[in-house]
Image (cartoon, grey):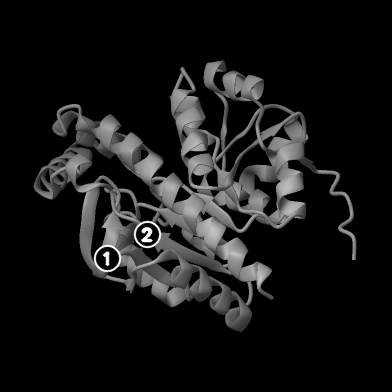
Amino acid sequence: MERQPDQLLEVSDEIATALAERRPVVALESSLITTDPSSETASLIEKAVRGAGAVPATIGIAGGKLVVGLTDSLIERFASTKGIPKISARDIGGALAGGGLGATTVAGTIVIAERAGIQVFTTAGIGGVHRRGEDTLDISPDLLQFRKTKMTVVSGGAKSILDHRLTAEYLETAGVPVYGYRTDKLAAFVVREADVPVTRMDDLHTAARAAEAHWQVNGPGTVLLTSPIDEQDAVDEAIVEAAIAEALAQCDQEGIVGNAVSPYLMKALARASGGMLPKAGRSLLLSTARVAGEFSAALSAIQAER
């Protein structure tokens, strides 16, 4: 049956053609563009996906539409316009009604990607359960969305300021399979790995078969494929943990709570890393983009066999 037009979606011709031909496509978030005034990183990520044999689909909201495949001019607008709101899954309705620009986060992007028929998304780091989450119940909407959205999310694991063990426990409870690409430990963002076991996948063809089998048996839901940062670009775990412990103590002293905690921790981590954090972040974005492109190609090949 021919797919009916979706009035909310605006899909670029290149991406629409690739999807119709069942070629590999990888979704990318637009929220990172708003923190990069030159938009250079977004361009490099798209090139990494193309180099791996897939079509990049940077996603955002503009003019009351869910835009799948931002043009170069629209990417420049996202990079140069101040105050663009970040859009998670729950914010999509308001952003569409407002008619302005909206930069999608992990949860917001995968909702739109699934609607467009894309099955692979990549980012450097996902959200998770925050440190002290057992007391605050501060849990990223990314994890909640993984329970509902059919997607393979390729990432470098949960961000370093989060509690990796609690995040893994939540994912297990939610029934989200977590695979480690060529590792049996959970990738830990700018730190290479956390001491949390995951199911090892030594090749992407096997990982793609596992994702496809998961969907066939369990129905819609996200598969998480984690790929550690390159060892030479990783930040030392001891530096990260010391910086976060000190920052959390400072938060207690100054009464910093709620949404203000995460940016405070990230700033503390940036200072403690001695300038290594931007380089590590870019390295991880590019490496996960390459892995996602290769995984998407493997998944397309498997689905073409049916």
At x 49% / y 41%, what residue is drawn? 51
Q: Which percent across, then down, holds residue 8?
A: 80, 43
Label 1 and label 2: CA atoms lie apart by: 9 Å
- The foreground one among 69 and 302 is 302
Local packing at callout 2 (Cα closer than 10 Å; few below 14, some 14-19, many 20+) is: many
In the picture, residue 60 is in which quadrant? top right
Q: Tag 1, which secondary structure?
A: loop
* Residue 226: mark: 2
In the rendered image, the vertical position of residue 105 relative to residue 134, given as above or below: above
* Cβ atoms under marks 1 and 2 closer than 8 Å: yes
Q: Which of the two labelled residues, at mark 1 and mark 2, occupies the earlier sequence position?
A: 1
Residue type for callout 2:
Thr
Q: Residues within 10 Å of mark 1 (few under 14, many from 20)?
A: some
Q: Nearer the viewer, residue 266 or 126?
A: 126
Q: What residue do we see at 45% from left, 63% from top?
A: 224
Q: Which residue is mark 1?
A: 183
The amino acid beneath tag 1 is Thr
**Quadrant in the picture for residue 193:** bottom left
Label 2: which secondary element: strand
